Amino acid sequence: MKKFLFAGELSLLLSPGLAAVAEIVVTMAGMKYAPVQVSASVGDTIRFVNDGDANHNVFVPMAQFATDLGKQQPGQEAVMTIGKAGTFEVECVFHSHMHAVVEVK
């Protein structure tokens, strides 16, 4: 019976009808996010990597997506998992001109 359950679970994981979860990398360097426009799906993760020489932050002020991943020093990264569909803006609280838009399907 255990073999049957395992085989059934494996077939679910390999089913072509299931969407794969993606990881999207956004860098923070030169006082900007790159890319500045991100398309994602529910369940995807966005890895924000500070490739610059200044502290940065990942902050989403919109109530339905509210997130603050705190300060990322140079060389650090932070991960956000997308929980719902919609569009939201990411801001850096240290650099008011740093913005990115994330569209989630």
Image: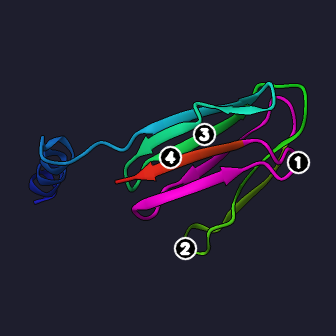
Residue placed under numbered mark 3 in the picture: 47
The Cα atoms of the two marked residues, 2 and 1, are separated by 22 Å
Residue placed under numbered mark 4 in the picture: 45
Q: Quadrant of the N terminus?
A: bottom left
The Cα atoms of the two marked residues, 4 and 2, are separated by 17 Å
| Residue type at numbered disc 3 | Arg
Mark 3 surroundings: few (<14), some (14-19) or many (≥20) residues within 10 A: some
Q: Which one is earlier in the sequence, the residue at label 3 or at label 2?
A: 3
Q: Which residues are magenta?
A: 73-98
Q: Residue at x 51, y 48 (%)?
A: 102
Looking at the rendered structure, the secondary structure element under dot 2 is helix
Horizontal side, residue 64 vs residue 58: left or right: left
Q: Residue at x 54, y 58 (%)?
A: 88
Q: Residue furthest front?
A: 97
The Cα atoms of the two marked residues, 1 and 3, are separated by 19 Å
Q: Residue at x 62, y 68 (%)?
A: 62
Q: Which one is earlier in the sequence, the residue at label 4 or at label 1?
A: 4
How many numbered discs, if any? 4
Residue placed under numbered mark 1 in the picture: 94
Q: Position of residue 69 (x, y in %)?
A: 73, 55
Q: Position of residue 17 (x, y in %)?
A: 12, 47
Looking at the rendered structure, the secondary structure element under dot 3 is strand
Horizontal side, residue 52 vs residue 7: left or right: right
| Residue type at numbered disc 4 | Thr
Horizontal side, residue 88 vs residue 3: left or right: right
Q: Which mark is residue 64?
A: 2
Q: Does the magenta segment cover residue 64?
A: no
